[in-house]
Amino acid sequence: MDEYVVWKCRRKTRYEKLRRNLGEVIHQLAKQKASRIEEGRLRSDHAHMMITSAKYAVSQVIGYIQGKSAIHVARGCR
């Protein structure tokens, strides 16, 4: 099942600094949930993604990615 999702980042200044590494992190997190990012764009304060997940509901995968990537951003990519 393919879904197109968009989510907004509240901490724009921190997000902008970490955006380059965040794409790789998001792909790894999707892989952990047996999902795949088909297409995506990270903008200055939000992300667009086309995601495919056969095992989990897309909403579960997105919730997981948002939560784990938020932790990653909060830690400053340590």
Image: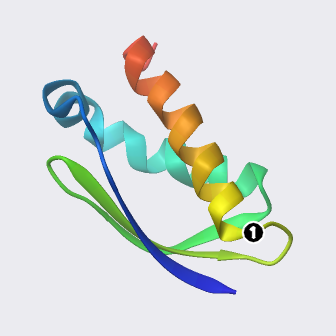
The amino acid on which the numbered mark 1 sits, given as a three-letter code, is Ala
- Crowdedness of circle 1 by 10 Å Cα count: few (<14), some, many (20+)? some
Drawn side of residue 11 relative to residue 63, left or right: left
Residue 23 in the image: state x and y as whole percent: 41, 50
Residue 46 in the image: state x and y as whole percent: 25, 53
Residue 14 sits in quarter: top left
**Residue name at image x 81 percent, y 66 percent:** 56
**Residue name at image x 64 percent, y 69 percent:** 36
Q: Is residue 23 above or below residue 10?
A: below
Secondary structure category for the residue under label 1: loop
Residue lying farthest to the bottom in this orientation: 1
Q: Is residue 22 above or below residue 5?
A: above
Drawn side of residue 49 relative to residue 68, left or right: left
Specify how the rendered protein is coloured: rainbow
**Residue position for label 1:** 57
In this rendering, the count of numbered labels is 1
Residue 29 in the image: state x and y as whole percent: 64, 46
Q: Is residue 47 above or below residue 32?
A: below
Q: Is residue 64 above or below residue 30?
A: above
Residue 54 sits in quarter: bottom right
- The quadrant of the image that shows the N terminus is bottom right
Work out whether residue 5 or residue 16 is closer to the camera in this orientation and state it.
Answer: 5
Drawn side of residue 11 relative to residue 76, left or right: left
**Residue name at image x 51 percent, y 43 percent:** 66
